[in-house]
Amino acid sequence: MNKENLVRFLQNTSLVSFHTAVKIAGQFHEKVIPKNQLHLEEDKICNEYLFLEKGYMRAFAHDTEGSEVTTNFCSQGQMVFEVNSFFNRTRSKENIQALTDCEGLYISFEELNNLFHTLPEFREFGRAVLVKGYADLKGRMLYMITETAEERYENLLKTNPQIFQFAPLKNIASYLGITDTSLSRIRKEILKK
Amino acid sequence: MNKENLVRFLQNTSLVSFHTAVKIAGQFHEKVIPKNQLHLEEDKICNEYLFLEKGYMRAFAHDTEGSEVTTNFCSQGQMVFEVNSFFNRTRSKENIQALTDCEGLYISFEELNNLFHTLPEFREFGRAVLVKGYADLKGRMLYMITETAEERYENLLKTNPQIFQFAPLKNIASYLGITDTSLSRIRKEILKK
DNA sequence: GCAGCATCTTGCCAAATGACAAGAAATAAA
DNA sequence: TTTATTTCTTGTCATTTGGCAAGATGCTGC
């Protein structure tokens, strides 16, 4: 594995020049995460700003009764980290788990700050990552409020079909805010059409 | 109106020294927003990074059928702006409206970037604002998925009681992801206890 | 292969919520 | 004040969703 994909990803934001992208990528370390392994464990401080090069992951938290709720799915070509824990150095309330064998490139909080300090272009990139994460979440929130479970399901199927190959339906159900039973019924209804 | 509150707010983050806080606040412009007026209008580019000094506001979007959905309530002492529109210079999908007569202090995107460029402490502050916004939204999303409408209502009542003085119940209902009819019934149920 | 476990579906019933419409109450406007 | 408008509540009924339990299917490890 080399760092071409990360360089390309940095460049594609139009915020980082090729030269700088190479310099940034040079600071990242390789990491392999086998299927089912936790990349980030609840109650620990997230210290890896990870570019997911290959594979799929999910983030999940526990609700007040202790059951798992999948809060996010991560696909290859995305930055994967727990924003709050990473930047505020607080214990994560979430776990991040590999749904498939994964490969990625990461830097620590300290390394990221050094890069932020010396490379304004990387700062811009970092901001863009945060803003995109925020915008995605906001879009999902609006969707959650205004659309039915069936519409949310069909939308996910359309926008993120790969996930259905790798994540069990109960993960997808909790991500959509319903039980696996309801999801099963919704799938049945859709088949009828 | 002077800028004491903003200086205090900047300092309270523990990211900005008093001296720098004064320097930063000096760049902000005063703004008054009468009750019901839009501070940000849909389809325009948000260009005001606003510290809300007095009053209460709400953000709202339109769903696919065109009905209003309240996406956020803003209280005095918070930064108020539409993250995606402001940082990406894109048309806002949201409106921000004064629920009461409001007073605030703002800078433009260009002014903010100049400050970011010259004052690392303000960059840290800016990052913290983004991270907090993200964390809040994530908490609400989890709450939305795992708690019942009644629990969400009672939680809002506990954590943000002032809003009930200023926002009509239909705004609160859509914020909670239910209809005003359902909210009315939930309130009735709670009275019985 | 076989046992054991997780996943997915289905049936039954209760509870929560929505859609629609009408009426009461509060607020704003004339 | 009177009128008009918005807000809030209530009633009726249909739909969605959940809780629970049982069965079917599929995967994993021995």
Image (spheres, coloured by chain):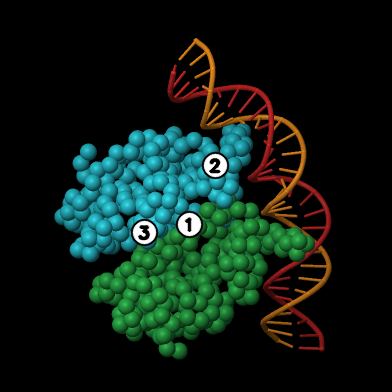
Chain colours: A cyan, B green, C orange, D red
Mark 2 neighbour density, 10 Å: few (under 14) some (14–19) many (20 or more): many
Relative depth, front residue between B144 and D3:
B144
| Helix, strand or loop at mark 1 | helix
Per the model, the C-alpha gap separating discs 3 and 2 is: 31 Å
Do labels 1 and 2 touch, CB within 8 Å? no
Can see residue A42?
A: yes
Q: Can you say whether A82 is above or below B40 in the image? A: above
> For numbered disc 2, what is the local secondary structure?
helix
Badge 3 and badge 2 in a common chain: yes
The answer to which image quadrant residue A119 occupies is bottom left
Mark 1, chain letter?
Answer: B
Q: Secondary structure at mark 3?
A: loop
Q: Amino acid at mark 2?
A: Ala
What residue do we see at 49% from left, 66% from top?
B94
Q: Position of residue B5 (x, y in %)?
A: 44, 82
Q: Amino acid at mark 3?
A: Arg
Q: Which residue does the numbered mark 3 point to in the structure image?
A: A89
Kindly identify which numbered label has been placed on residue B138: 1
Q: Which mark is residue A173?
A: 2
Mark pair 1, 2: CA separation? 18 Å
Where is the C terminus of chain B found, in terms of image quarters?
bottom right
Residue at the image position 50 percent from the left and 40 percent from the top: A171
Mark 2 falls within which chain? A
